[in-house]
Amino acid sequence: MKKIGKYQISNVSSNSNGFTMIEIISVLVIIGILSAVAVSKMTSNDAYDVVMETETLKAHLRYSQIRAMANNQSWGIKINGGNSYTLQKNGSTASVNLPNEDSATHSFASGVSATVSATPGTKTITFDDLGSPVSVNSDIVITLRKQGKNPHTLTITQKTGFIY
């Protein structure tokens, strides 16, 4: 140990057995990036497809409900075999397009299918001039699935026509 003035200087180097803060932060950033990439690769789009189609169907049901209330005519949605649906006016295909569609028919995303009140096949949901579903004795439940998985339901109440 040397003494320079009133200060003492040691020849022994300081403890260098640990990591610097920059090294620790760099490792954490790299681990974060790798985990974000891994999680995005592991998640499937199936759940997103079902939710997207459910929200689209909900918007189109509300559209037909509003048309029925505005025009004092019967408007509705006819679900065709569970793979698509068509806007209906007075029991036949409407001459207007669904919102954000090129026709009165919307086809579900690949692999997505719909079941109405646990009954597969064709089902028409018609609204009257008050916005209530016509000729139903209970709530209408529509379940959408992608390849049998990720079920997502929407319900239309029998008396009020509330869609949720």
Image: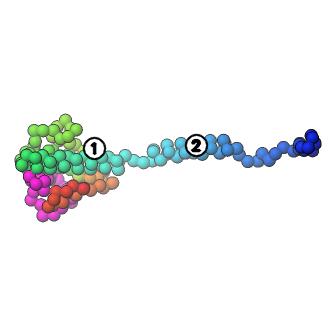
Q: Residues within 10 Å of mark 1 (few under 14, many from 20)?
A: some
Residue 119: give x, y in percent of width and height.
18, 58
Residue located beneath label 2 in the image: 29
Q: Answer yes or no: is residue 16 visible.
A: yes
What scheme was used to colour the molecule?
A: rainbow
Which sits in the foreground, 125 or 69?
69
Displayed quadrant of residue 32 = top right
Displayed quadrant of residue 86 = top left
Whole-angstrom CA distance, mark 1 to mark 2, is 37 Å
Residue 90: give x, y in percent of width and height.
6, 47
Q: Residue at x 28, y 43 (%)?
A: 110
Residue at the top extreme of this rendering: 102
Of helix, strand and loop, which mostly describes the magenta segment? loop
Count of number-bearing discs? 2
- The answer to if 140 sits in the magenta stretch is yes
Which sits in the foreground, 9 or 39?
9
For label 1, the SS is: loop
- Which amino acid type is marked by label 1? Ala
Q: Residue at x 39, y 47 (%)?
A: 44
Q: Residue at x 10, y 42 (%)?
A: 94
Q: Where is 31 relative to 115, above or below?
A: above
Residue 164: give x, y in percent of width and height.
24, 56
Q: Residue at x 26, y 56 (%)?
A: 153
Of labels 1 and 2, the one closer to you: 2
Residue located beneath label 1 in the image: 109
For label 2, the SS is: helix
First to last magenta residue range = 115-143
Q: Earlier in the sequence, mark 1 or mark 2?
A: 2
